[in-house]
Image: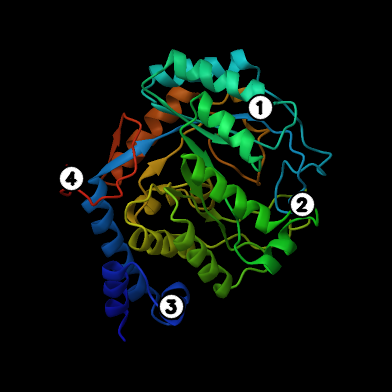
């Protein structure tokens, strides 16, 4: 079967056999042909569903304390060199106020698994944000919690929850995480989140240590089972204070191919062009949009703390004020041929709309 036929089948059926997915992911000897077909079709599909709209999310990284010791992460519990911080409720609300004035209508509260932020504190923060900005969505990304905790946050007004599974292969998961962490628990958390009623987001690292093409295909199959509303992927980027500091970073071309494959498999999904993508290539986010992504997440966190949310080396946009980030990303999106829209940007599962509308 030709490359074009494979991509057309993927677009039509939202699925391919493993062998054909492997060909599109690896594409040895036919890289240009694969990427031309994938990117063209993915861009057409995202325009069928979302036009040229790109949704903007305000990211608030409110704590870099974490009880986990994931081997790839710069804010892991075992990194004694990390400079720790926590934002107060007042500081978080100040970030939201600034973001709202800049046109953000979704706030993403992201942090490590920090026991200092009890369920009561999180619920209070969420309820205050919703009371002040009832036309906004609140997204949480706080890691693994109990069903009751997720339900409490949802009842307080949280709309979305992001929890990347990172890898769907149990053996690979064990090579990236300590023994006290479980892939089955991570997967169960995602199904709990979905059952409660959140818009659920997950995703995986591209090019993480020991990852194979077969692992990536397993990730895609897990996504088919979960059917998430949001899918975030980004390249593995090493951190000097982890055991993977000498490992090669994930490749731009592989991330872009997978973004396009995800758009064709999950045409309804909200898919970000991530900061990590912009970190490994100056135009990485623009290329991500052209490969099918339709979300960007500028940082609203206080500048004085941004460098301390140090997940990986070389992270971009740690020194710019929120207003400058907002203007910068709008210009980048426009230059790529798309348009920032100011609304909460719901998922379009029931088909699309005319391109450009």
> Label 4, on which residue?
356
Kindly state the secondary structure of the residue where label 4 is placed: loop
Q: Of marks 1 and 3, which one's residue comes earlier in the chain? A: 3
Q: Of marks 2 and 1, which one's residue comes earlier in the chain? A: 1
User: Where, by quadrant of the figure, is residue 90 drawn?
Assistant: top right
Name the residue: 65% across, 35% down: 309
Q: Report if residue 318 is visible in the image.
A: no
Q: Where in the figure is residue 273, as x and y percent of width and height?
A: 43, 47
Between the C-alphas of marks 2 and 1, the distance is 30 Å
Q: Nearer the viewer, mark 3 or mark 4?
A: 4
For the C terminus, give its image quadrant: top left
> Label 3, on which residue?
27
Vertical side of 158 occupied by 73: above or below: below
> Label 2, on which residue?
242
Mark 3: give few (<14), some (14-19) or many (20+) Cα within 10 Å.
Answer: some
Q: Of marks 3 and 2, which one's residue comes earlier in the chain? A: 3
């Amino acid at each position: 079967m030709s490359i074009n036929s494979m991509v057309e089948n993927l677009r039509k059926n939202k699925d391919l056999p493993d062998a054909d997915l492997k060909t599109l992911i690896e594409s040895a000897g036919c890289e240009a042909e694969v990427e031309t077909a994938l990117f063209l079709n993915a861009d057409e599909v995202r325009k069928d569903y979302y036009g040229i709209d790109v949704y903007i999310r305000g990211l608030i990284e409110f704590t870099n304390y974490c009880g986990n010791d994931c081997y790839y992460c710069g804010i892991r519990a075992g990194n004694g060199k990390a400079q720790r911080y926590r934002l107060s409720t007042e500081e978080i609300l100040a970030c939201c106020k600034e973001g709202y004035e800049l046109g953000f209508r979704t706030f993403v509260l992201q942090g490590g698994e920090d026991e200092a932020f009890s369920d009561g504190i999180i619920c209070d923060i969420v309820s205050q944000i919703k009371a002040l900005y009832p036309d906004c969505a609140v997204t949480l990304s706080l890691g693994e919690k109990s069903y009751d905790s997720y339900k409490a946050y949802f009842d307080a007004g949280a709309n979305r929850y992001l929890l990347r599974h990172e890898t769907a292969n149990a053996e690979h998961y064990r090579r990236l995480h300590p023994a006290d962490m479980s892939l089955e628990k991570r997967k169960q958390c995602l199904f709990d989140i979905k059952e409660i009623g959140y818009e659920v987001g997950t995703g995986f690292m591209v090019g993480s240590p020991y990852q194979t093409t077969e692992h990536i295909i397993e990730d895609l199959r897990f996504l088919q089972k979960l059917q998430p509303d949001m899918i975030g992927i980004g390249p593995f980027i090493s951190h000097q204070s982890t055991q993977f500091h000498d490992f090669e970073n994930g490749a731009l071309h592989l991330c872009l191919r997978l973004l396009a494959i995800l758009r064709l498999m999950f045409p309804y999904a909200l898919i970000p062009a991530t900061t990590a993508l912009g970190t490994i290539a100056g135009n990485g986010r623009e290329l991500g949009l052209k490969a099918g992504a339709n979300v960007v997440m500028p940082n609203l966190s206080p500048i004085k703390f941004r460098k301390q949310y140090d997940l990986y080396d070389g992270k971009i946009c740690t020194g710019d004020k929120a207003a400058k980030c907002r203007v910068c990303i709008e210009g980048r999106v426009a230059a790529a041929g798309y348009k920032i829209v100011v609304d909460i940007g719901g998922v379009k599962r029931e088909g699309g709309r005319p391109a450009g509308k």
